[in-house]
Image (cartoon, rainbow, N blue to C red):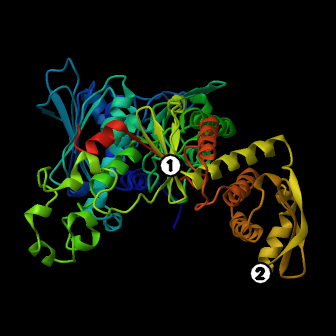
Amino acid sequence: MRIHQLPETLINQIAAGEVIERPASVIKELVENAVDAGAQKVEIATAGGGKALLRVIDDGRGMDAEELALAVRRHCTSKIDQRLDDIKTLGFRGEALPSIGSVARLTLRSRPQDAGHANEITLAGGIPTPLKPAAANQGTTVEVRDLFFATPARLKFLKSDRAETAAITEVVRRIAIAFPAVRFTLSGPDRSTIDLPATGEDRLARIAQVLGDEFAANTIALDAAREDITLTGHIGLPTWNKANSLSQYAFVNGRPVQDKQILSAIRAAYSDTLPRGRYPVAVLWITLDPAMVDVNVHPAKADVRFRDPGLVRGLIIGAIRQALTNEGDRASPSARADLAQAFSSAAPFANGPDMGQRGLAGFGATSAGSSSYRGWEPSRSPSQPLGQEMPGFSEAAQAEILGASAPSARFEEASDDTSAQLHPLGAARAQVHENYILAQTRDGLVIVDQHAAHERLVFERLKTALRAGPVASQILLLPEIIDLPEDDCDRLAERAEELSKFGLVLERFGPGAIAVRETPSMLGETDVVGLVRDLADEIAEWDSAGGLQDRLEAVASTMACHGSVRSGRRLMRDEMNALLREMERTPGSGQCNHGRPTYIELKLSDIEKLFSRR
């Protein structure tokens, strides 16, 4: 076959394969056109997951008859003229409408402000019909039916109606966050109606509409700049995280993007504060000169390329880490709510079928099952009025209640000095199960996981010491010989120089063993065998990915875990208070190296609600 010019319809269908991947792609292009047209209200309707119907109505400036005829032709646009380095609109290619019209049945109806009537044009499989007058309000209505009827192969690869509906919702959510001054309404027989009223310049109010009211209480505001790039937005507390990255939103010069460089920078900024498999919440706005970013990377315009990607990455990581250092230690209100819910949802001791086994001894519980109720006597009821018949409940007998067992928690006499309660983490009052510290604050209660908290403190000390130079080590009287698989020994030997920076000096001892000669002095007595085995597992993962800094922090995290106060160790009150004070001084102490919270705060008002005092 000789080289020849393809028909216009086939050219449009080829272009549609890049621009229009699924119904959500159509909605993205149409809503972006509406926003570019200055719309203050955008209404979106769908049916059949967008396969049967997609309709977008806006109140923008509209198009006259001449513009409407050009709008369905490729590379006709009002967004740019001669240059691609000064793009300030969402759309600019002039490909969306003709691409949609080549694979679906497309109807456009538009009316400018001063026109006496609207005009309408229809495309079916890329073939247009003549313009005709129509009745419509100011703005534009775009209706797409039977998506991909002209390209059945693409239709077969679409997902279920529910999945496509969810994808459309996500697209609208992202655009709605980017433009809080615009009202968005999403409806249809295949979904529940979503109405997002305009919030003007209040971005936080729009984010709350999309991500929930708890967003503001669980996030930290960002406002940073480097050279000619500014970064604003909100990031979630490390203890408020998600199971996927769908709650990460990035906007470059107002354009919603899903750029891998930005998502990678967010992940790196939270690298030592989140557990594996959990993702932070972040909404970021990046503003820079349009000439410094290329949005013409892919027809979908979801990816961008920065002229100086290192500068942007450094700004994101630095700003997020600085914000976490300044404010990231506070406990998440969501965690407090979960704790209160856990208390309030516990079944009352007298409601279950095993009441006799779980009931308090002083209240006459005898055996499991419904038979315990048959032996009930009014005189033994806990609801019996206090009086002469039951002296055990009188004021004089409060030291012991009917043989109830003594408290299981270890406690010490509280000091009369209330100044410690004025600290953010309060004054230690007790240690429960040799792992949890109970501290009293001025207006609540704090529960601290001593191992997780101390692990974070040691981790921060290691990082500080590493920045100052090699970590001090202590020589073992006798080298510790550890048997390991030969491949693990090889990996450790290769990283021996890096490990020595942390004060861990080791060397090969035969084909299947490692000899440890020095350990970090700040760890004190530690489980050397467990530490080295865990490091071998960590290094096995490094071989696939990760830079030097990430690797060093992974070593520090593992060492901190082995060098911290263990669960089960009893602490004196002075030790507990010292731990609390050091947590208050240490950045990032609100969560351990694995991302778990180190403490949870329960306000006095929450406690009073549990006991129906409020």
The image quadrant of residue 469 is top right
Asked if residue 328 can be seen in this view, the reply is: yes
* SS class, disc 1: strand
Of residues 235 and 436, which is closer to you in this image? 436
Quadrant for the C terminus in the image:
top left
Name above or below for residue 490 compared with residue 147: below
Q: Residue pushed farthest top?
A: 114
The CA distance from mark 1 to mark 2 is 45 Å
- What residue is disc 2 on? 485
Rendering coords of residue 231 (x, y %): 55, 30
**Amino acid type indicated by mark 2:** Pro
Give the side of residue 10 with respect to residue 515, left or right.
Answer: left
| Residue 244 % position (x, y) | 45, 55
Classify mark 1: residues with Cα within 10 Å, few (<14), some (14-19) or many (20+).
Answer: many
Residue at image position (59%, 36%) is: 584
Residue designated by label 1: 430
Report the residue at 31% width, 45% height from top. Answer: 27
